[in-house]
């Protein structure tokens, strides 16, 4: 992997890397924040998965997470939201499919399946790479994300028991098999067999008996996509209630879907993950 | 003034307004963050002046200032960097002149003089407007800014003794009469009489005997524009040494000119201003 940018921030380093991904079959970009504590020895890693239309840059500019990471001694690992490049299939007329909209699944349908394997990229290739190359404690990981990335964080933790010490999400797409965004992407990437979609849906995974893991979700009560039926936290709550799954779902009055909402609560999320990682 | 956007953040409100400016003779946009404390009564105001190419949006998205403002009970007032609109003169081929580059002076040269009066806008029209319309303590103001906006903050405080309780700046253009950015803008806005430029230059104002005010400057030691001779904090330091002016200039090793630098230190700046405002 090649470091293409290095910026000093909160006493640590905000770095950007590119590398040839064998999972996505293209050049991939990601960012890492190393807190000051990483100068003295390896630190735990907090993965942040971004939402539709984002790259690795949005969260590092807008969320204010680096301050808390520097206080808590956590590295932030910030992947892109899809494969990229001229040779990678895209749907340029749509913001919710193709480049910028990988949905953190492994596509099986043409033309997407050669590159759109973000689930394995985020959960296998990227952790192995950064734990080999950077001052990270092997296997000490937690994961969070926003919207499409909240969905990605949830299914990553639910499908890989033991891989993450804790999981949280901001306004996640909780039940994609039952919303427009999910229908559009899952149909394209996974095909028309809707039973097969359930393996990539956090609510369905919990209903199917996924192993418990500490799960924190913050949702803005005035989120326009909540009102539009894209996020469906009530379905997640019902599934957790039915299965006795330990969910903390906080509806935050007045908050919307933006990074201003994330900035407000990301300090609490990182503190929550730091506690879980310290106990791991 | 008309509120065109309202976003919940850190328990307060991030609002955006537009209004017809009699100073700039165009519709102007600005943002305000009201901390939770403003629900109970009026609060002091912290003005933040942005740098070249910015609007009111950059700082509110990138600086992480709202968290500290909410903790400290400060309102943030975030003006645009120039007049705007199709009827406003521009130099579209240049990022450092015209729209986005008002330089916080009152232009006297055609075609700029009808609109480019950002000094009076920031120091007269805008404070009078927001103190009349919003829950702000009249006359309780401090000011900061970045780069071109750091220059703006410095000259605002130096030319208006008593108006601001304290002033600070991030990587300010300290001595525009002696740098390329200043030559380009001052020549266009103020004309070719270089003696007249000195009334809009912080270093020259201090040399001319400006009244002391607490002054904090943070400057990244690895800032590309510092190396390029655009910022000249050493000239400011020499002027302050010569006149006994109370300057705290901190060179921050490894930091660049970006908002990642601002985010790192803005908490200390807001705490510094909050102390000065509490003593005011």
Image (cartoon, coloured by chain):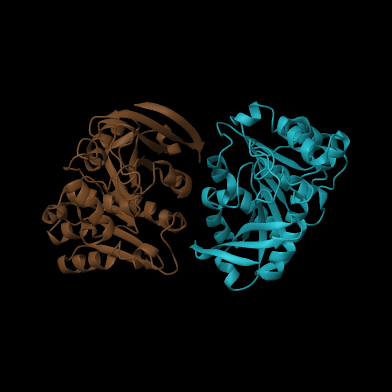
Chain colours: A brown, B cyan
Using the image as rendered, state which of residue B220 and residue A197 is in the foreground: A197
Residue B130 seen in the current view? yes
- Within the image, what quadrant is residue B179 found in? top right
Using the image as rendered, state which of residue B252 and residue A108 is in the foreground: A108
Q: Report x, y in % for residue A93.
A: 35, 47
From the viewer's perspective, is residue B84 above or below residue A228? Answer: above
Q: For the view shown, which residue lies furthest in the front direction?
A: B87
Q: Is residue B221 left or right of residue A70?
A: right
Q: Residue at x 74, y 33 (%)?
A: B184
Q: Report x, y in % for residue B96.
A: 67, 37
Q: Report x, y in % for residue A122.
A: 27, 40
Q: Is residue A84 left or right of residue A265?
A: left
Q: Residue at x 79, y 35 (%)?
A: B187
From the viewer's perspective, is residue A176 above or below residue B238? Answer: below
- Within the image, what quadrant is residue B198 found in? top right
Q: Is residue B83 left or right of residue A108?
A: right
Q: Residue at x 52, y 56 (%)?
A: B67
Q: Which quadrant is the N terminus of chain A positioned in?
A: top left
Q: For the view shown, which residue lies furthest in the bottom direction?
A: B40
From the viewer's perspective, is residue B49 above or below residue B128? Answer: above
From the viewer's perspective, is residue B51 above or below residue A195? Answer: above
Q: Residue at x 28, y 64 (%)?
A: A232
Q: How many labels sit on residues?
A: 0
Q: Report x, y in % for residue B270.
A: 62, 53
Residue B140 seen in the current view? no
Using the image as rendered, state which of residue B197 and residue B240 is in the foreground: B197
């Amino acid at each position: 992997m090649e470091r293409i940018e290095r910026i000093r921030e909160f006493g640590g380093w905000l770095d950007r890397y590119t590398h040839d991904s064998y999972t996505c079959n293209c050049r991939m970009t990601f960012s890492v924040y190393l807190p000051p504590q990483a100068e003295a020895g390896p630190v735990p890693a907090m993965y942040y998965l971004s939402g539709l239309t984002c790259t690795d840059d949005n969260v590092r500019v807008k969320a204010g997470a680096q301050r808390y990471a520097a206080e808590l001694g956590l590295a932030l690992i910030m992947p892109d939201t899809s494969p990229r490049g001229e040779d990678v299939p895209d749907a340029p007329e749509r913001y919710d499919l193709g480049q910028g909209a990988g949905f953190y699944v492994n596509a099986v349908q043409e033309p997407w399946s050669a590159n759109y394997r973000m689930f394995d990229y985020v959960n296998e290739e990227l952790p192995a790479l950064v734990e080999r190359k950077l001052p990270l404690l092997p296997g000490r990981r937690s994961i969070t994300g926003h919207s499409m990335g909240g969905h990605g964080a949830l299914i990553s933790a639910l499908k890989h028991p033991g891989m993450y010490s804790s999981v949280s999400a901001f306004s996640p797409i909780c039940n994609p098999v039952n919303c427009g965004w999910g229908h559009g992407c899952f149909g394209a990437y996974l095909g028309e067999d809707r039973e097969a979609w359930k393996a990539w849906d956090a609510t369905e995974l919990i209903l199917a008996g996924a192993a418990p893991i500490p799960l924190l979700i913050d949702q803005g009560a005035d989120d326009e996509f909540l009102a539009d039926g894209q996020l469906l936290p009530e379905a997640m709550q019902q599934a957790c209630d039915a299965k006795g799954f330990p969910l903390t779902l906080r509806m935050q009055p007045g908050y919307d879907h933006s990074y201003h909402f994330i900035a407000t609560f990301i300090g609490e999320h990182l503190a929550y993950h730091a506690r879980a990682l310290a106990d791991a």
